[in-house]
Image: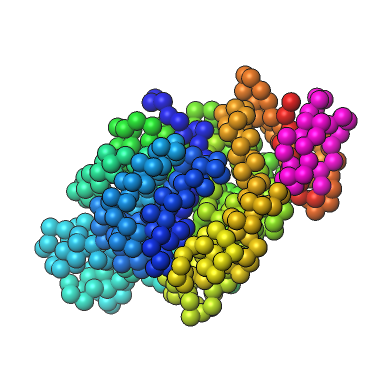
Amino acid sequence: MKNNSWGGRVVYQIYPRSFNDSNGDGIGDINGITEKLDYLKDLGISALWLSSIYCSPMNDFGYDISDYYQIDPLFGNLNDFDNLLKQAHKHNIKILMDFVPNHTSVDHEWFKKSRSSKQNSKRDWYIWKKPKPNGGTPNNWLSQFGGSAWKFDEKTGEYYLHSFDVSQPDLNWRNPEVVEEITKMMRFWLKRGVDGFRVDVAYQLFKDPFFRDEPDNPEYKIDKNSQYNSLLHIYTVALPETLEMLKKLHDVIDEYEDRFMVCEIYTFLKEIVNLYHIVDRQSFAPFNFSFLSLPWIAQNHKRFIDEFDEMIGDNYFPTYVLGSHDFPRIVSKLGENQARTAALLQLTLRGIPFIYYGEELGMKNRDIPKEKVKDPIALHTPGTGFGRDPVRTPMQWDDSEYAGFSDAEPWLPLETEYRKRNVQTEKQNKTSFLNLYKSILKLRNTKTSLSNGKYIKYFCKNPDIFGYFRRNKLEETFILANFSKEAQETELPNSNWNILLSTGLDRVEKIEKSTLTLRPFEAVILGY
Ligand code: GLC
Ligand code: CA
């Protein structure tokens, strides 16, 4: 196995449209990111994942790519990108690009050719099917953005498959030319110096060759779930061919030094672990979104994390995520104090944490007035409350009119409380979210047990407290988190602990007794 530095890294996800606008058009861009590298370094992160910045008509804001080799002019150009890469590397910050292999935009040259005639050499690069004898869709598959996954194309009288927006036709991964072309594109960026990829929709590359109908989901609740969840996706998600292909794509990464690939998959523990074993490299990990769905109960977290860490084993790195450009902001979901504790856990667990921009400020969801809605999911399913604009609002740098994000009105409205929750004011407030993130990351970056120690289970007699040790040959740290809204007391194993950090940022002390009382929703890092 090649050496790699990723196990000790902390990744920060940037949604480029919303991070920092350098040229006053209300949309964040690459030079805007470069301007903020000092901020990122100071925060304590060591890698960035940039959501898609390739050429795109922006129906799905970059996840509908029309040219994989170019940067969209909204974000800048290849020179700006090379400059960002160079400056980031100077700061010892790696860069992961988004990588969208499941589909292109309808505006991509390949698709234009593919739809032009049944005889075109690119026809088979996408998934085309004849209508049913009654003219209906080829089968019952659903789009994740609502409605059928099939779109009839007048010109050639066939349907094409789109697992997402109609403007995002699925590529046909059973065609070797597609595989060849996409791996060529990966090498183009790897040679340019990018440090790897976050693979979009990684779990869905291959679809059932017989195009069978998917069965109903017996647990579907019409008022709670999106229409997509009314079916069980046994013929479109996690096919064995897909898992093999991820291994093959990872082999491309491994041709280069110290690169990394992280895959977007939504599945249960056993399948996540299975994927680690199939690819079997330290430079590979699937995302683990469990924090987004686990109920806020200490024992549920303990059960999941104990098992997850053990099943993955020391050879691979777990990942932990509290949010992304697709999910509600953690503070809005849990509440501020709970989110602080969740962050302390995320940043002190073994493995690679992914911080979504603004999480370090405690940014909240922002209700978007109807006339300002931009997300295609929200536009397709009005009135359902689905939609991702609320978590994509501009980064809050200061309390000025446009939050220091831009000189012009931003493409999405600012979060309503940005005047009190922004980088500038939080820097000055000793106990702010920002200072919590900085302090935890500082500890993580100086205490080797936190960055590379083993995860050691701990059985706490108080069921409201979840705890664990991080231990290597040199040192040990001990984490305790109170999930309840009441203060909770617990006995301590061993004596002489010091509180190195509390989520309140108001408690650094030597513990004289053999018990410790944690305040409501408080978490602490103990050490010697
Ligand atoms: C992934 C992205 C999401 C996008 C979708 C289609 O789930 O995270 O933002 O809309 O893929 O590419
Ligand atoms: Ca701009």
Residue 417: x and y in percent read: 63, 67
Can residue 310 be seen at all in this image of the molecule?
no
Secondary structure character of the magenta stretch overall: loop
Residue drawn at x 82%, y 47% as measured from the top left: 519
Q: Residue furthest top?
A: 473
Residue drawn at x 41%, y 50% as measured from the top left: 34
Residue 318: x and y in percent read: 53, 38
Can residue 452 be seen at all in this image of the molecule?
yes
Q: Residue furthest bottom?
A: 371
The answer to whether residue 262 is left or right of residue 344 is left
The answer to whether residue 44 is left or right of residue 342 is left
Q: Residue furthest right?
A: 513
Residue drawn at x 31%, y 32% as measured from the top left: 256
The answer to whether residue 235 is left or right of residue 114 is right
Say whether residue 408 is magenta: no
> Relative to 183, does residue 208 appear above or below in the rendering?
below
Tell me the quarter of the image containing the N terminus: top left
Tell me the quarter of the image containing the C terminus: top right
Q: Which residues are magenta?
A: 492-519
> Relative to 135, does residue 207 appear above or below in the rendering?
above
- 37, 297: nearer the viewer: 37
> Relative to 89, does residue 18 appear above or below in the rendering?
below
Say whether residue 515 is magenta: yes
Residue drawn at x 53%, y 52% as measured from the top left: 356
> Relative to 489, does residue 226 appear above or below in the rendering?
below
Colouring style: rainbow
